[in-house]
Image (cartoon, grey):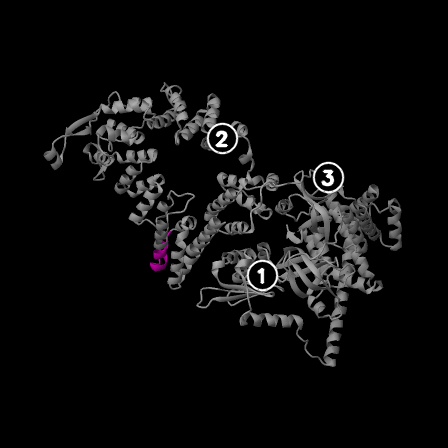
Amino acid sequence: MKSSWTEIMSSALLGTDKKPLNIHVLPEDIRSELLALGQDSAEGTLLKAAAIHHFYNRSGTLPDKLENSGYRQITESKSFIDTPTINVFLRITETGYFEKEYLLRLWLDKVIGQNKIAAPNIILPIINLGIGLSKHTRKKIMAILGERAKAILPLKPDFKAKELQSNITDQWKEGNPEERRTFISELRIKDVDQSLSLIQSDWPMETIVFKRTIIEILSEETQPSEFSFLTQLYENEFTAKPKEKKTEIECRSLLAKVLLKDINSNLFRSTVAELQKYIGQEKKSGIMGLLMGGKDKVIHLPTVVDTFFNAENIVNIYGIDPKNPDPAMYKTDVIYWFSALLAIMPFDILTSLLEKSKKETFEYLLNNNEFKAKIEGKDVSVLLNALSENVKNYCDQELLQMILQFDSHERKYLLLPYIDTKVFEEYVIKEKLFLEAQVITHHPANYEDWSPYFSVKMVEATYKSLVVEKKHYYDKINQLMAKHLHISTLSRLEEMFQSAASDHFKEYWIKNVYQPVKTSIEIKTSISNL
Amino acid sequence: MNFTPAQVQTLAPDDASFKAGKALSGKNQWLSASFTERSLWGEIKGSGSKPYQTQVDINAIAFKCSCPSRKFPCKHGIGLLLLWANDPSAVTAGTEPSWVAEWMDKRVAKAEKPAEPKEQTEEDIAKSEKSKQKRADERMMSVEAGVEELTLWMSDLVRTGLLQLQAKDRSFFDKTAARMIDAKAPGLASWVKSLGKINYYADNHIWQNEAVVILSKMHLLTSAFQNLANLPEIWQQTIKSLLGWNQSPKELLADESAEIIKDIWVVVGQETTQEEDIIIQRSWLKGINTQKSALILNFGTRFAPLDISVVNGSILEAGIVFFPSVWQQRAVVKLQNRILDQVPKALVCLPNINELFSFLAATYAEYPYASDICCLVSGIRPVSDQERFVAADRDNNYMEIAPEIHADKMINWLAISGGDYYVTAMVIRNNKMMPLGIFMDNKYVLI
């Protein structure tokens, strides 16, 4: 049969001029059918033969067979989510890009809490939605996928399920640096001893760059068991030595910062002892001094470098980047090194040495003429940068609030990521910074709602700007409101919707504030009611 | 009838309208929302002083809204239907207010009694018949000339050999296709175009086979046309339709003698494609009692939206009229009574892929030009086999999946079915399967 079709094909391809079809090679059935159709030209005969042969072949074709059926009946151990839960998910899929992941996580947490799995009709939509979302969210998605969903995950490689599923050895031993970093950070939260054990076992084989990464990870909320490992590193591997690499000094710097946080560490104790040497006394100033007498503890720094405050010593002990001090800013090199140390040591060391409250210590450091410089005709505290850095290292909210009242806007913004929710909201309300996207972006509530009071304040401020004063602001604010506004804000939002007269700005407000926020709040409410 | 959000999506004129409708599908957004057995309506606050009144005919899908939107259906119609689809309890059973009853009554009256044709005198009729005959004769002559020209073109190709096709550029085929359009034979033009669309960079074996098969079918068709006078009436109509004679749904609906096939019809699948500026929607229906398959063609343009009365995945109690053909396929819905929630009785279907092959062979024997053959086959499951998808039966016989089917559709089939065997609705196109949906219990689920 194949040869007769080959015969037809070769005649067709070469042309009947060169190779007319020999109908005698055709099967008897086809030949007789062809003859029954009557005489035709050579080309017509060829095409008729091809047509008959084609249908003849097709009618006799049998289906192919799978070699391995691979069939297995899938049984689920958990029950599927119900229709209302599915409907909430479908609403989430229609929300804006910025609030979608936030709402999805709330929904996923609810479903995980119910110990249920995604219903068959939303398996594909939820996997598709997860593509490109954070690993954390995808892990939550994985948690609600049942057996049938897991069976299709290999068919959706973009979801990157493998990196969420592989076992400890795979990820730690074979992952790229980023995967290993993520892996160890997450394992550390779940099982600090296991993470430390893995780190220690492979430590000698790690590159210096990855060692720095690990130390960075361990610097965050260091656990007691990790302190001894880090102390060991500080005292042995990263102790100062000739011809050090820059990364090695950076490792020492990170280690010093961690050890300074531990009042039992040798470094903490030796630092306190060294600083003690610079604490002196002088008569109290002002009326109180005259009335009460007594003496104040003060800092007496030498005017020239000494055995402690000198570049080599500070680099060797604290790994601080040995930059050349700016003479316009720092009257002496010692002040520069003091300021560098102030940035990384606990502020309480100074309050305790000076026997002052935190506020008094802060004011003392800022108002002391020794620590001031004239920049562009203005008196500037040279320690303010160091104090800001200190806030970043220790997240000391009291110190942070003091800086916020004092400092320039630019530097305040740099400190915003370190503020806790309550302080942040109070600060924004006090300073009326509702429309400053650069500020609001740093609200500490990442996956939480803003407080009801703050939410209402935000809604009122944006409404006032847009609808009453007809002034636009950066759209990011609206995106953040859609994510974080507290559900109790809806009633206030509805009042505003009803009140204002219709115009272009109101339409804009409806489209960009009212509708997305309302949808988001409705979804959040639905999720909490599931 | 409960619509699913996916079905409502198919009714939206575009993605933006669906999204806008979705934003209006919250219970709190509607001042009122009610339904009866035939209608769904609601009032929603818009930018005007009065709320918009939105209404939907839920049996013969149609929308009406008092909003000024030029889109059809508007976002309010989509939103209302979505509200009902997502949360039926959010819509209360009620009595139609006058503004709904009036519209619905008019629709029912129109469906029951189509507009009377304009009265014509005998003279008018004779004149009209004469002019119709003249047009038909002219058309026939034009097509005959086209067929003659095409026969010569094909003969030249076959005489000099098809190896040359690989070197031809697109204009070679487009030019001949345009000549067939001029000859009023658009059906032949499509065949010529399909010859031009072959991937001549594919394996030689593949494109050469495709070219020979297409040319041989074209030759059969032109030969049949040249022999038209000797063929039975039904074959004549079929051949003429294949060559491109129009089939008018309007005329078919007006034809009192056309047989109405009443049945429970499952709209098993829908496909929308665009050819140049024309949007073509194919809806495949399967009759539960008659086991007949029907194809409803629906055409739209940018300015004339598609008719939305046939909802994908729905189950209609309806009367359908087929265009006359040797192999009845294309049809129009003449009477649409109601939409059902579930399939009322057990389905009759082909038991496995072997039987499907036999059925296909019998179909091609009856009508070699059969395409897009719609079938129900039991015990079919999707299989992901060596980086491709196939559909297999319990005997492990399988059929390849048509390239038109996106991988996500197959994955969705796997997700919904759990990889298990179900009665599957499908269309067979070019010997490959286009899976459309599965029957689970009494429900039809689109995949």
Side of B428 relative to A514 (left or right): right
Q: Which mark is residue A66?
A: 3
Q: Quadrant of residue A226?
A: top left
Q: Quadrant of residue A384?
A: top left
| Type of amino acid at the residue the image marks with label 1 | Arg
Q: Which mark is residue A180?
A: 2
- In the image shown, does A57 or A348 lie closer to the viewer? A348
Q: Chain of mark 3?
A: A
- Residue A467 forms part of the magenta stretch: yes
- Residue B308 forms part of the magenta stretch: no
Q: Mark 2: few, some, or many residues within 10 Å (few <14, many ≥20)?
A: some
| Residue A168 seen in render | yes
Residue drawn where x is 29% and y is 33% of the image? A386
Across and down, in percent, residue B320 comes to 71, 64
Side of A27 relative to A431 (left or right): right
Secondary structure at numbered mark 2: helix
Q: Chain of mark 1?
A: B
Q: Chain of mark 2?
A: A
- Count of residue discs: 3
Side of A444 relative to B197 (left or right): left
| Type of amino acid at the residue the image marks with label 3 | Leu
Across and down, in percent, residue A332 comes to 23, 28
**Magenta-drawn segment:** A462-473
